[in-house]
Image: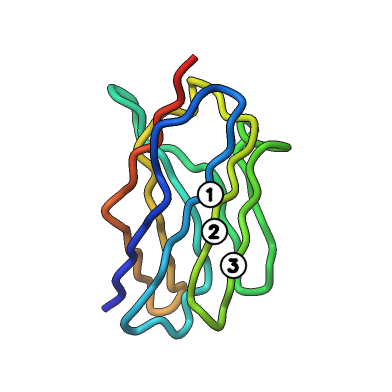
Amino acid sequence: QVQLVESGGGLVQAGDSLRLSCVASGSVSRLNIMGWYRQAPGKRRELVTTITTGGTTVYADSVKGRFIISRDNVQNTVYLQMNSLRPEDTAVYYCNAVRIWPRADYWGQGTQVTVSS
């Protein structure tokens, strides 16, 4: 089993920055992909960004150029640097980890990010 614990959420104003962290513990070997998803009230959970163990990244169009994902494979931690935050970034942000084989998906409990205008 893998446990994911997020931290770093909060209430900020538009234009501010926040840094989220997610620490993985337990059976962390072969966590091929780690990333962040978010879910706003009344909306479906959506991909924000992912990163592989090799450092390959994917970003949602809505956050490209503003958010940066990074990963420390030694500390089993993934970070999300969020810059130029907008009110539409308001959501619960969830950390996700994927082991490709055998397939397993793990989720954190989520951290609230609120951006006021």
Q: Amino acid at mark 3?
A: Arg
At 43% from the left and 73% from the top, the residue drawn is 99
Q: Determine which quarter of the picture holds residue 86.
A: top right
What kind of element bears circle 3?
Answer: strand
- Do callouts 3 and 2 mark residues in contact (Cβ within 8 Å)? yes
At 46% from the left and 58% from the top, the residue drawn is 21
What kind of element bears circle 1?
Answer: strand
Q: Amino acid at mark 1?
A: Arg
Instruction: Determine crowd level at label 2: few under 14, some 14-19, many 20+ residues with C-alpha closer than 10 A.
Output: many
- Disc marking residue 51: none
Nearer the viewer's eye, disc 2 or disc 1? 1
- Disc marking residue 71: 3
Relative to 56, residue 76 above or below: below
Residue at mark 1: 19
Marks 3/2: CA–CA distance? 6 Å
- Do callouts 2 and 1 mark residues in contact (Cβ within 8 Å)? yes
- Disc marking residue 79: 2
Q: Determine which quarter of the picture holds residue 59.
A: top right
What kind of element bears circle 2?
Answer: strand
1 or 3: tag closer to the N-terminus: 1
